[in-house]
């Protein structure tokens, strides 16, 4: 779909039309060849436990080829309008903060997924479409594969475009233990004889 220049008397309509192009419909997303998660519940549970999101919180995560978590970041997003361009910029800023880009690779190796915690039910909204557009564009600009877009609501979680989901975790459920596919948190750096004794004791 293409849009021409609107006459000056319809500037507000032109702005609305431009914003409307920065979202993806579910059919467009499903046709984009987004790679499927092998174990989406494990990914969702791990991100939920790590970030404990509240409504209007977005979590962008980067997974390695074995679906292990490389990096993740969460941030709140309370915008009056759903704009994929603004969402793209926010996601790109978070990706640049937590992980180097892969633009030098011929083909992307790591995959970025987005978990968005919001009010309402699991049905697709224009806000979801704007997040999808933003995720796809941010991945292109950071040299990543565009991965799943997941919503977390009071009804549970759902991978949009795939029809997979579950009741837990949801916006009201307590965090579960970290998923086994996640890389362990780095140990604090310590030194000296005392730390050696503690390490030997822990290994027994």
Image: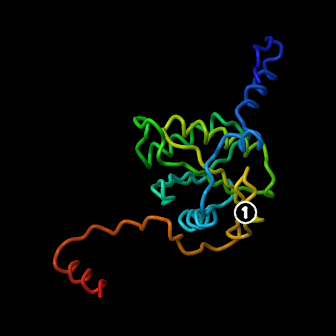
Q: Report the colour scheme.
A: rainbow
Q: How many marks?
A: 1
Q: Quadrant of residue 49?
A: bottom right
* Residue at 70% from the left image edge and 56% from the top image edge: 159
Residue 115 lies left or right of residue 96; in this view the side is right
- Classify residue 93 as left or right of residue 78: left
Q: Secondary structure at mark 1?
A: strand
Query: Which residue has dot 1 on it?
Result: 165
Q: Is residue 49 above or below residue 32?
A: below
Q: Label 1 neighbourhood size at 10 Å, few (<14), some (14-19), many (20+)?
A: many
Estimate the x, y position of residue 195 in percent, counting from the top left: 23, 78
Q: Quadrant of residue 127?
A: top right
Image quadrant containing the N terminus: top right
Residue at the image position 67 percent from the left and 43 percent from the top: 131
| Apparent side of residue 45 relative to residue 93 in the rendered image (left or right) | right
Q: How far from the left and from the top, in percent, is residue 134?
A: 63, 39
User: Residue farthest to the left?
Assistant: 193
Tell me what residue is drawn at x 50 percent, y 54 percent.
Answer: 63
Asked if residue 184 lies left or right of residue 23, the reply is left
Q: Nearer the viewer, residue 16 or 181?
A: 181
Name the image quarter holding the C terminus.
Answer: bottom left
For the point 51% across and 53% down, the residue is 73
């Amino acid at each position: 779909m293409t849009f021409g220049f609107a006459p000056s008397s319809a500037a507000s309509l032109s702005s609305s039309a431009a914003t409307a192009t920065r979202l993806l419909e579910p059919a467009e997303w499903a046709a984009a060849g987004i790679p499927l998660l092998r174990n989406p519940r494990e990914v969702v549970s791990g991100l939920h436990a790590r970030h404990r999101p509240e409504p209007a919180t977005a979590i962008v995560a980067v997974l390695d080829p074995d679906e292990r978590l490389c990096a993740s970041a969460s941030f709140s997003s309370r915008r009056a309008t759903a704009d994929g361009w603004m969402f793209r910029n926010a996601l790109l800023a978070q990706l640049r903060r937590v992980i180097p880009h892969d633009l030098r690779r011929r083909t992307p190796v790591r995959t970025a997924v987005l978990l968005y915690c919001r009010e309402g039910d699991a049905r697709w909204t224009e806000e979801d479409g704007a997040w999808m557009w933003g995720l796809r564009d941010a991945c292109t600009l950071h040299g990543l594969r565009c991965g799943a877009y997941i919503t977390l609501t009071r009804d549970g979680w759902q991978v949009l475009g795939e029809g997979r989901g579950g009741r837990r975790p949801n916006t009201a459920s307590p965090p579960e233990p970290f998923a086994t596919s996640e890389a362990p948190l780095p140990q604090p750096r310590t030194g000296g004889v005392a730390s050696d004794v503690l390490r030997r004791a822990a290994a027994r």
